[in-house]
Image (cartoon, helix red, strand yellow):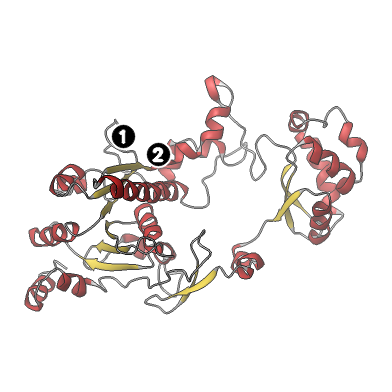
Amino acid sequence: MQPLSGVTVVALEQAVAAPYASRQLADLGARVIKVERPGSGDFARSYDGRVRGLSSHFVWANRNKESLTLDFKDPRGLAVLRRLVDRADVFLQNLAPGAAARAGLGAGELRARRPELIVCDISGYGSPGPYAGRKAYDLLVQSEAGLLSVTGTPEAVAKAGIAVSDIAAGMYAYSSVLAALLERGRTGQGTHLDVSMLEATAEWLGFPLYYAFDGAPPPPRAGAAHATICPYGPFAAGDGTVVMTAVQNDREWRGFCTGFLGRPALATDPRYATNAGRDAHREELGRLIAARFGELSGAEAMDLLDAVPVANARVNSLAEVWAHPQLAARGRWHSVPTPAGPVPALAPPGPTTGAPRMEAVPALGEHTGAVLAELGLSEEEIGALRADGVV
């Protein structure tokens, strides 16, 4: 399934947010030309070396792309980049605030040249506004958006274990570009998309924001448990397996008391009969439930919960996710080439027909010569640019 075949994206990108957005477009068939610094490239290339010497972040977010090294601060490099953008459908960038505009690559200037171009800027805070010029990294935006205030334990805040603000911005950029392509198909006109990590994360904070509406107290930090639904959280079985258990309503609670706890009288106990009561007495109730889990193995506990039924899940390690039986049964793991050899990669969620696009994670500058030749530069011109460090 490659509905974006024929769409060209020029991505002046780094780190996670923009590369993740452009990878989604590439997965659906778009040609993504990734513009990188000569010599060093996208700094995410050097975050770590956990994938056979390659960066885990980079391998994850950069398959199906072409890498062009280019110093656009050099007038010759900027001229090449302009020629490239003149052929593109989408220009995507997440440079430092204002850097693209200072280089003559702002949305207004680019779209004045080509009104059909879709320009997508990703930044920490968007523009205008008092924060427009501030640098932003994932943890900083998680903090500004209030995510840390509702994540962690009563004693300490905690960041999400993934780059959630980057990913949120990347996904809104991706969906916005898709919508802009549809609109351009009807009107012939491109548009300017201004996606901020703050706004993307704040949108995802909708439940806590409304829970704290009009000055009300925010949801408490509850660790791995749900902040307001009880019992909904992790319990350790007698063999050490941690089982996430989710009782969503009073009907399930009654079945849980009878079928799992073996204490039907608790279902009508005034302290526990409603979720509000269970939430108010969560510590004492938690001790009762934990004692029952301790009598069972993880498999026994999950079988009893399934029989009620009450939703449950194992708290898996990352090693267990690599071997997850559901991912295997659905054929989600494929292979993607990298400069260090093939590595497994998950197919994009959604499409169920046809083989997913699983082309290579590019080496730095791997496609520079081919892209420049496509633009009409001669071997001599390309050689001179290489000699001067422009590409």
Q: Which mark is residue 331?
A: none
Tell me what residue is drawn at x 18 percent, y 42 percent. Answer: 108
- Say which residue appears at 8% left-offset and 58% top-offset: 75
Q: Secondary structure at mark 2?
A: helix
Q: Residues within 10 Å of mark 2 (few under 14, many from 20)?
A: many
Amino acid, disc 2: Leu
**View extreme (top): residue:** 214
x 87%, y 46%: residue: 261
The location of residue 327, given as percent across then percent down, is 61, 66
Which residue bears the numbered disc 2?
A: 198
- Residue found at the very far front of the displayed protein: 186
Give percent across and percent down for residue 350: 51, 58
What count of labels does the image hold? 2
Please tell me which residue lies in front, 278 or 329. 329
Establish if 160 lies above or below 381: above
**Relative to 228, 96 lies left or right:** left
Looking at the picture, tell me which residue is in the foreground, 76 or 293.
76
Of residue 180 and residue 142, the one placed in the foreground of this image is: 180
Above/below status of 246 relative to 69: above
Q: How busy is the neighbourhood of tag 1: few (under 14 within 10 Å), some, or many (20 plus)?
A: few
* Quadrant where the C terminus is found in the figure: bottom left
Per the rendering, the mark at residue 131 is 1
Residue 243: x and y, percent?
Answer: 73, 54
Q: Is 314 displayed left or right of 123 in the figure?
A: right
Q: Earlier in the sequence, mark 2 or mark 1?
A: 1
Which secondary structure lies at badge 1? loop
Q: Quadrant of residue 332?
A: bottom right
Residue depicted at 39% across the width and 72% down the height: 359
**Image marks 2 and 1: residues in contact by CB distance under 8 Å:** yes
For the residues carrying marks 2 and 1, which lies nearer the camera in this image? 2
